[in-house]
Structures are given as structure tokens and as C-alpha cells.
Amino acid sequence: MTTQHTDAIARLAGPATVIADHSWPGTSTTVLRLRTPGGSQLILKTNTNEVSFHRELHALTHWAPALHPHAPRLLDADEEQRHLLMTAVAGQPVNTLSLPPDEARQVHRQAGRLMRALHEAAPPTVLTDFGRQRAAYIRPQLADGATPLTATESTLAFDALALLEELGPQTAVPSHLDFTSRNLLWQSGLPASRTPRLGVIDFETSRYEAAGRDFLRITQRTLRINHDLRQAFFSGYGRNPTPQERYLMHICGVADAAAITVSATQAGNSAFATEARGVLHDALRRWPPNRPA
């Protein structure tokens, strides 16, 4: 913890003490858990990336209130130093828990409801150039001569980018874009009189985006191999993806997985790279995607 963080705690949270550091090494964020003299727990998050900071500030200000009490509540912000003070969401990350099947289904039904609430937190808009902008963001990441992608994986990725560039305007909704089990917190083992509650954290990638792409992170991981939980999630959401969303998920899934394979390999994160490669190989078996009517 730096002097900057000590000063920020004193200014924003008063006489609170640091009880845990949840920061991820190699990222732009520092995440400190605080405890106040009254016993309340708070989170001080500092982000050196200006875009990510403002995305999270906007989401906590305008969208997260629609998820109350399942998301952090913004208490204060220092835009100059990029500090956010928020309430702590109770629970443990779902990816750290071993849950019985019934409870796992309950978690994912609640997750679907939370995503639906987020998507409806503000009126939809239209992204006229979504596909071309997304392809333009990913293409340079795949053009590196030192890419870890095989020739087949690379061909698949560039086919997906070409299809992205052909996409028309997309309806966009408030989206989390890192809606995964590590950012979903579950209160397990509560008394029978209390309903277990799921919370969602980490809104630094949030922005208006096509709803199908917000489905991607959770469907590419847990829900890719567990169709029972996939059914529970979309039951909670209130509907299954439309044919247009499935098409977008297929091609965005390939493009995103290729980019993650490259970036995770470069960062030495073999687990993420292996997971992303699995998504690519699944897509290869179902390629090309069915274009909706």
C-alpha cells in the first residue's frame, strides 16, 4: 500500500483500516478492503487506467443502483487520483466454491436475473459500427508475427473478423463485459430463514454493448461445458439468446478467444490461454456459423 492510498483512505473513508488486499498482480487496479470503526466493510479501488476508471465510475453511478443490494454502492470518488470508495459486497467468488448441483443452479438463475437487471438499467441505444470497431480493435493483436496461434486457429480468427466487419447496426444495452464466476459473489451457508444472495462486482469494463457479447464471458467458461447451468442462467435472464445474438456470440467468441489466447500467452497466464484455445476448438467444430435470416 502506498502513501497515496493511505491519504485516500483518510480523506474518503476516515479512520478505516485495511484488512485485505484483493489486487490482481499485473493489472491497472489496486483493490483494498477496509473496515470502519463501526465494523462496516468498504472497498477502495484505484485504477491507473483512465478509461477503465471512468467506465466503472459511470456504471456505479448510473447502472449499479438498479442492482441494489446485489452490487456495490458508490460512496465517494476522487477523479483526479482515480479512487473509488464503495460498499463491500458480501460473499465468496463463485469460482472458489464447490457447490452442490441444486445450489449451483440457484446461483446461475440469480446471475441471469442480475444480468437482465443490468441490461434494463438504462434505455437501449444503437451501435452503428459495432462489428468494424470490434474487428479493428482485435486485428492488430492477431497480426503479431510471434503469435502463439496455429495456422488453423489463425485462419479461423481472421474469418471471424471478416464476418464481424459485415455486421450491421447492433442494439446495445448497459453491459458488464466481465460477467464471470470470479466477479460473482455468493453468500453460502446462511441460516434457513435467509435467502442466499448473489452479488456482482468489478464494473471497470462496463459500457454500452450488444447484449450477445455480454453473454460471452460466462457462456465461454462455466456454461460452455455445463448445459444444466446454462439453462438455469437463461431461465433467470428470462429468455434464450435470439438467432441474431447466437450468431454474434459465435463470431465474437472466436475473435475474443483468439485475442485472449495471444494476450494470455504473452502474459504467461497458461490457464487463460488454455481455456481460450478450448473455445476456439469448439468453434472450429461448428464453423461456419449459421447466418440468421
Image (cartoon, helix red, strand yellow):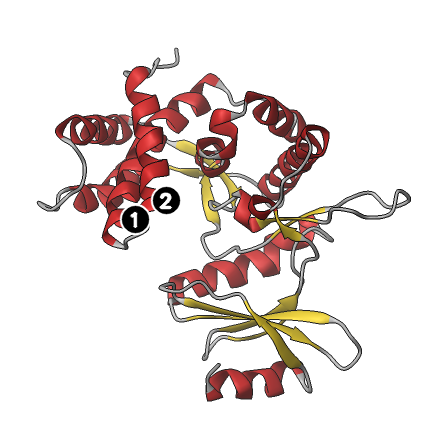
Q: Is residue 279 left or right of residue 38?
A: left
Residue 37: quarter of image: bottom right
Per the rendering, the mark at residue 128 is: none
Residue 85: quarter of image: bottom right
Q: Amino acid at mark 1?
A: Ala
Q: From this viewpoint, which residue is outermost toward the right?
A: 193
Q: Are marks 2 and 1 in contact (CB under 8 Å)?
A: yes
Above or below, comparing residue 32 to residue 172 in the picture:
below
The residue lying at 53 percent from left, 65 percent from top is: 22
Residue that badge 1 annotates: 264
Q: Of residues 83 and 41, which is closer to you in this image? A: 41
The residue lying at 54 percent from left, 86 percent from top is: 6
Residue 222: give x, y in percent of width and height. 51, 33
Residue that badge 2 annotates: 271
Asked whether the viewer can see residue 260, the reply is yes
Q: Of residues 267 and 287, which is closer to you in this image? A: 267
Q: Amino acid at mark 2?
A: Ala
Judged from the image, the secondary structure of the residue bearing numbered disc 2 is: helix
Q: Is residue 277 left or right of residue 188?
A: left
Residue 35: quarter of image: bottom right
Q: Is residue 86 left or right of residue 46?
A: right
The residue lying at 46 percent from left, 35 percent from top is: 221
Q: Nearer the viewer, mark 2 or mark 1?
A: 2
Q: What's the CA distance linking mark 2 and mark 1?
A: 8 Å
Residue 274: give x, y in percent of width and height. 33, 38
Judged from the image, the secondary structure of the residue bearing numbered disc 1 is: helix
Q: Residues within 10 Å of mark 1 (few under 14, many from 20)?
A: some
Mark closer to the chain start, 2 or 1: 1
